[in-house]
Image (cartoon, rainbow, N blue to C red):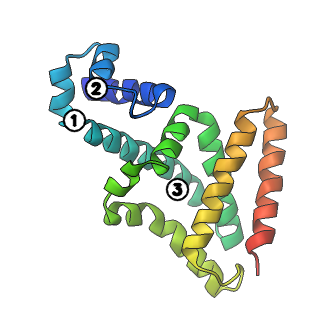
Amino acid sequence: MDKREKLLQTALELFVSQGFNDTPTSKIAKEAGIATRTLFYFFPTKDELIISLYLKLKGQATENINVALAEVKSKKEVIKTYYEESLKWSLRNPNEFSFLAQFSNSPYLKKIGADEISAQITPVLQLFRVAIEEQQVADIDVNLLYALISNQVFGVNQYLSSNKFTKKEQHNIIEDTFFMFWKMIER
């Protein structure tokens, strides 16, 4: 692992365990075994480190989900796959998901450019638009649909993470909660 990746991995662990405000860059550098000046070479500010980590993790999650989506055709199945893969990724990557949730509920989200956020969510919004046009989903604002599915994923992740379920039980809960979500948005 190169120094930049080591810094990002260490920052992830510290930000998740201590939060953004309580994690100084000096501690990240020390825990990574890298000089503070090297940290600032890669990330001139703490804000840039946090944003870089967010973009990296968001990209990894999106890539994982897109691989699964390539196999699916019907809009309902695409939305279901998006939901299921988001949850599966979150359960396989608890620190990464925790960081993304923390970031999304912080002032740092406003530091991401509108173009970057749009690039991240446009494919999902387009999916909802097509589902609305095909009259599979209720005709409501696609941004609201995105908020609903995102919050559903977060809530179900919290529930699954805070309980000891077998893989089969997790699978059944994911299936059942998607069914409830679909009933809420279907036309």
CA distance separating discs 3 and 1: 29 Å
First of labels 3, 1 by sequence position:
1
Q: Where is residue 68 in the image (x, y as percent from the top left)?
A: 59, 53
Which secondary structure, mark 3? helix
Instruction: Work out which quarter of the rendered image holds the N terminus and state it.
Output: top left
Residue 77 left/right relative to 23:
right
* Mark toward the viewer: 3 or 1: 1
Res. 91 visible in picture:
yes
Residue 78 left/right relative to 100:
right
Q: Where is residue 87 in the image (x, y as percent from the top left)?
A: 65, 47
* Mark toward the viewer: 1 or 2: 2
Label 2 CA crowd tier, 10 Å (few <14, some 14–19, many 20+): some
Read off the residue under disc 2: 25
* Residue occupying image coordinates x 36% and y 39%: 53
Q: Is residue 80 above or below residue 162?
A: below
Residue 177 lies in quadrant: bottom right
Amino acid at dot 3: Asn
* Residue occupying image coordinates x 61% and y 35%: 92
Label 1 CA crowd tier, 10 Å (few <14, some 14–19, many 20+): some
The circle on residue 66 is: 3
The circle on residue 43 is: 1
Q: Position of residue 130 (x, y in %)?
A: 59, 80
Res. 74 visible in picture:
no
Q: Nearer the viewer, residue 92 or 177?
A: 177
Which secondary structure, mark 2? helix
Instruction: Work out which quarter of the rendered image holds the C terminus and state it.
Output: bottom right
Count of picture labels: 3
Amino acid at dot 1: Phe
* Residue occupying image coordinates x 26% and y 23%: 3
State yes or no: discs 3 and 1 in contact (Cβ < 8 Å). Answer: no
